[in-house]
Amino acid sequence: SHEPCMSPLAPQPRAHVRRAGGFWRQPLWAPLNDAEAWNRLVRIVNPAWSFTEPRARVVRVVDEAPGVRSLWLKPNGRFGHFSPGQHVLLELEIDGVRQARCFSLSHAPRADRLLRLTIKRKDDGPVSRAAHALARGQVVRLGRAQGQFAPRDPAAPLLLLAAGSGITPMLSLLHGMVAAGADRDVVLLHGIRAEADAIGTLELQQLAARWPRLRVHVRASASQGRLDPAAVAGLVPDWRERETLLCGPDGFMRQVEAMYAAAGCSALLQSESFGRRAAPIVPGAAAHAVSHGSPEQVFTALAGQSLLEAAEAAGLRPRYGCRRGICRTCTCRKRSGTVTNLLTGLASGPGEELIQLCVSSPQSALELAL
């Protein structure tokens, strides 16, 4: 290799600038160059202000359906931009401990920059319960928008398949398409348990009124039967010719994914899920001991199983967000042993390094700093 050449005409770093930067980094001035100290100071004036992290104030709370509530949030300048279909990490302090989960944004970007999260309350979900307890004026932490759940072809016929609260990213996508003046052929199928569980009914009616080529079918299982593959094929006979986006409970998504795989159409399908989608474990997979804590505790994880799933099966409650290797909330330090990355198939080294529990599977005995 060789050192890169610098053009004699290129601007050279000025010595006095370098000296000035070094001067302000001296320990004497630590209170002035400590970002977190400044954050604490400005939060005294306004809890939503921060020099380093996205925060947002709750400006409105709307009950959408039994157990479903929308939070309208006003973010600070650190949040940045997002695209329809993306999700964010919502972080709340619960009993003195920060916990975070990913939720889809349920509205496209707006001129007033307000964000909407539409959250279904889950009895076993501490973050969803805490989110439902939020009131106007409270401030929350957010991650930056992530994900690529959106149509790939801007003109192809499109099928949106949602069940339950899986409608939330679909609402964002539809609002975004209408705002962009889309004129594509779109069918939305939304499966719910009963009419009272419908989310966004009025919005969908308004969108369909502005967009004649948008067709919306809401199917209540209590009166019409489940939205299963047979129902999808009956309502949308040309489903094999449509790009398809899928979001909903794990069982529903697995059925649809199997339907597309059997038809050789998996390339048309994109899925979005933040639930516990445990990967099937190969029978006879090797079991590995995973030690953690002081005093030392041990649980067992199988080859091919994510460390997050194995830890939860052992009764542990590690932090997590997206469960898909995106948000990095479940990152922890591996002190020894080797893991495989379930996304890339690559093996780690045997020494100390940071790994993501949700996409790491053991290849040997492990020691983790949980």
Image: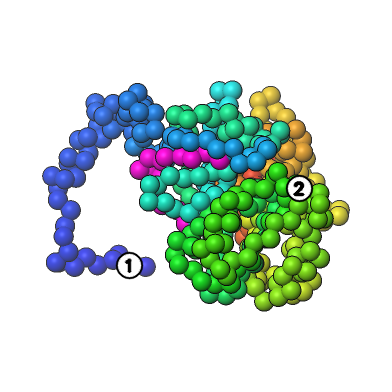
What residue lies at 35% left-to-right and 23% top-to-bottom? 44
**Left or right of 367 on screen, residue 111:** left
Find residue 16 and report its horizontal and vertical position in percent.
13, 44
Q: Which residue is mark 1?
A: 2
Identity of the residue furthest to the front in this view? 209
Mark 2: give few (<14), some (14-19) or many (20+) Cα within 10 Å.
some
Find residue 316 and report its horizontal and vertical position in percent.
71, 33
Residue 82 on the magenta span: yes
Q: Is residue 70 above or below residue 221?
A: above
Q: Which residue is mark 2?
A: 193
Query: Which quadrant holds residue 169?
Result: bottom right
Quadrant where the N terminus is found in the figure? bottom left
What residue lies at 26% left-to-right and 29% top-to-bottom? 32
Indicate how the structure is coloured in the image.
rainbow
**Left or right of 93 on screen, residue 79:** left
Secondary structure type for disc 2: loop
Quadrant where the C terminus is found in the figure? top right
Q: Magenta residues? A: 70-83
What residue lies at 48% left-to-right and 50% top-to-bottom? 145
